[in-house]
Image (tube, grey):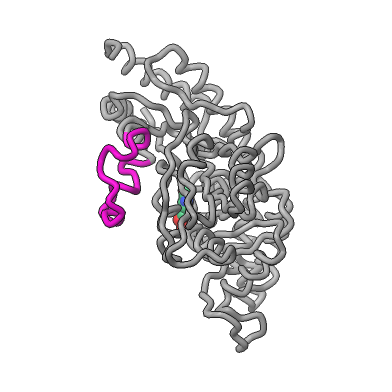
Amino acid sequence: MEPIPFLDLGAVFERSKKDISLAMSRVLESGWYILGREVETFENAFARFCEAEHAVGVANGLDALELGLRAMGVKAGDEVIVPSNTYIATWLAVSHVGAIPVPVEPDATFNIDPDRIEAAITAKTRVVLPVHLYGQSANMTRIVAVARRHGLRVLEDGAQAHGARHDNRRIGAYGDAVAWSFYPGKNLGAMGDGGAVTTNNPGIADRLRVLRNYGSRIKYHNETIGFNSRLDEVQAAILSARLLRLDKENSHRGKIAQIYNEGLAGTQLVLPVVARHAEPVWHLYVVRTKDRDGLAAKLLEHKIGSMIHYPIPPHLQPAYASLGLAEGSLPISETLHREVLSLPMGPTMTKSQAIRVIAAVREWDAGRTVA
Ligand SMILES: *Cc1c(COP(=O)(O)O)cnc(C)c1O
């Protein structure tokens, strides 16, 4: 029995090998390796893809978030509203600018609950930072409405949602800006680190271009204390090649999700809840059960990989001990972190692999009495 890996990245890149090799040689032969034509070409293509006016390439997703916050003028002592249920990078970016992450609990979609945002707003709040977790858009209509009512900016974390739609429009410029990651395992992944920010706000785009390049618009003229956070030419060329396949890969993920939805219905698992406004791109297919560890062990018996996204919520990490958010302070998120399991998902996964996963889950289900 062939193992089913959680995600077969080698196979993903192998399929684009010709295009990627061509892209890499083109850069190699160009003699220009930082901030050149490839980055500009990719920025234009990605902005179009996201239905946004501007895209600015940066070094990685965490920098995209941090520079996005800086471009919005967030400063030390400010507060930024973040989901309690997210990858820690969302919080780290807030901390890196000296601001304070203020967590808000999720609803049934795993995303930030728009009903709970208003209660978290104080006189120090500057930005609301929703994450489109696992590939499903947060409720942007309601989040933007509450932010506008209070004069707040909205920065979105799109690291898991390249191509996702909200009310038929792509994620890309619902809020003031969207931070993207091109870490290899994302739906749009580079062969190394990469990131970008998309926005319809020309002022934010302009500040980002200066911030990412030593605070400089003209070489050796530095107008602010900037950073070195650039997307490089090789990664940009690879991303341009991979972007051409993204819609097809995302719809393949959608088909696998559909097979899971049908095959796992009626088991004791809590299946992913998709909001009416959302058209997800299934970065991850995340199920819930109190017997999460038992399920993972059963899958392993059948040589099926799975992962936990994420095992420990940010507020319970030693890194955030200083916030004083004790165990029990964010109970919804804490329960999720105990119960979630991500099943195999990816653009090269086959239907027969999905059927084998379903059979293994059903074997686990049959061996369990209802809790
Ligand atoms: C991957 C990820 C990031 C960070 O991206 P990097 O490119 O690894 O820095 C941020 N937020 C979320 C939700 C992510 O999944």
Query: Which is more toward the observer, 68 or 32?
Result: 68
Q: Is residue 312 visible?
A: yes
Position of residue 76 measured from the top left corner of the image (x, y, whole percent): 44, 67
Q: What residue is shown at x 34% (from left), y 44% (from top)? A: 313
Quarter of the figure with the N terminus: top left
Residue depicted at 47% across the width and 41% down the height: 119
Is residue 305 visible in the rendered image? The answer is: no
What residue do we see at 60% from left, 59% from top? 197
Q: Quadrant of the C terminus?
A: top left
Magenta residues? Answer: 310-334
Residue in the picture at 59% in, 35% down: 280
**Compared to 77, does 90 lie above or below?**
above
Q: Is residue 168 left or right of residue 310?
A: right
Q: Answer above or below: position of 130 versus 235.
A: above
Q: Which residue is at the front of the view, 362 or 170? A: 170
Tell which residue pokes out farthest to the bottom in this image: 220
Q: Is residue 1 above or below residue 75?
A: above
Q: Position of residue 297 (x, y in %)?
A: 27, 28
Foreground residue among 181 and 344:
181
> Residue 4 appears in which quarter of the rendering?
top left
- Relative horizontal placement of residue 195, taking residue 91 as reference (left or right): right
